[in-house]
Image (spheres, rainbow, N blue to C red):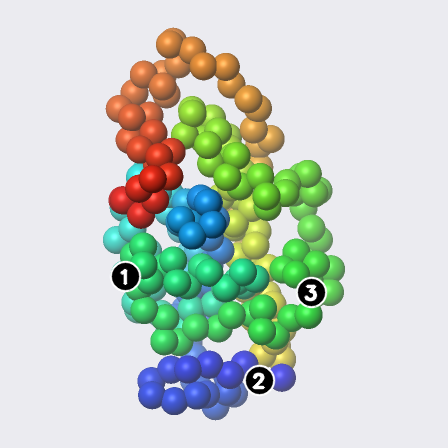
Amino acid sequence: MSVIFWAKGGYYAMDEYELSLDSVFFFDAHIVGEIGREFVASMVWLYNFQWSSWTKSLDSPEVMIEQWNKADVIVSFDEEEIIMSLMKSQFGLKYDAYVNLVDYCEEKLIDTAAEIGLEYPEELKRFDKSQSTQMWMDFIQGNAAALNALLFYSAWNTELIYHIFFRVCGDTAPISIFIPWTLEQPKKQAKSHESKVQDSSLYETLKRSYDFSNPRDE
C-alpha cells in the first residue's frame, strides 16, 4: 500500500518519491483547553532518529520549528483532525507535506500496537487520554511527574506512529528507538508555601499557562 501525500507541487505515492529517513518528522502532541480554545500544551517528536520535546511556557519552540521546516514529510496520527490547524495558528507552521496516518488505519492509534507487533506498556494501561488536561494542571501546580507522564505517553505514541508509517508503506521500521522518558504515576501534591517549585520563578511562568483565557500566548 502506498502513502499518498502532497509535496513540492503535486501528489506523490511514497514509492514514487525519494525520502531520506532522517528527514521525516514524526510527532505526537497533547491538546488541552475548552472546545474552540484548544492549544498545544506539550509535544514530543522524532527527527533524524533523535528525540526532542517542547512544553508550553517552559521551552522555546525554535528547535521544533527549525526541524519541522527542514523535514520533507510531517507524520502524525490526528484522530480529531485539529492538531495541524493548531500547529499553524500557534506556531505559524506550514504542513504542505503532511501524512495523517488516521487515513490509513481502521483502528484508533493505541489499538494498532498489537497488530504491528508492539507491546503496549503496562504502565500506560492506567493512563487515559482524557486525563491530559488534569495532568497538565497538576504539572502547573508543581507536580513534575505529571509532565513526565505526558511526555512518556507522547513518546510512546510517536514510536507507534513511526512503526505504523513504515507498515503503511509496505515495509518495517529500520530500527527500534529507545524512549528516553519513563513513566512515574503522578501523585497529588498538597499546596505548600515550602515547595521549591511553587516558590520559584518557574512556577510563576508556568502559572500563566493555566490561564486558558490566553491559550496561545507563548
Taking 216 as reference, is 100 left or right? right
Q: Secondary structure at mark 1?
A: loop
Q: Are marks 2 and 1 in contact (CB under 8 Å)?
A: no
Percent position of residue 55, x then y? 37, 43
Percent position of residue 109, x then y? 63, 60
Percent position of residue 70, x then y? 30, 69
What residue appears at the point 45 percent right and 59 percent down from the top-left corner?
A: 83
Provide the residue designation for mark 2: 2
Viewer-side residue, 138 vs 161: 138
Tell me, yes or no, if residue 199 can be seen here.
yes
Q: Are marks 1 and 3 in contact (CB under 8 Å)?
A: no
What residue appears at the point 57 percent right and 32 percent down from the top-left corner?
A: 184
Q: Amino acid at mark 1?
A: Gly
User: Which corner quadrant holds the C terminus?
Assistant: top left
Taking 16 as reference, is 112 left or right? right
Provide the residue designation for mark 1: 92
Q: Secondary structure at mark 2?
A: loop
- Reply above or below: 135 against 53: above
Tag 3 or tag 2, which sits nearer the N-term? 2
Provide the residue designation for mark 3: 107
Percent position of residue 195, x then y? 39, 14
Tell me, yes or no, if residue 43 can be seen here.
no
Category of crowding for the residue at label 1, using alpha-carbon neighbours closer than 10 angstroms: few (below 14), some (14–19), many (at least 20): few
- Reply above or below: 207 against 17: above
Q: Amino acid at mark 3?
A: Glu
Q: Real-space Cα distance between discs 2 and 1?
A: 29 Å
Q: Amino acid at mark 2?
A: Ser
Q: Real-space Cα distance between discs 2 and 3?
A: 18 Å
What residue appears at the point 50 percent right and 64 percent down from the top-left corner?
A: 81
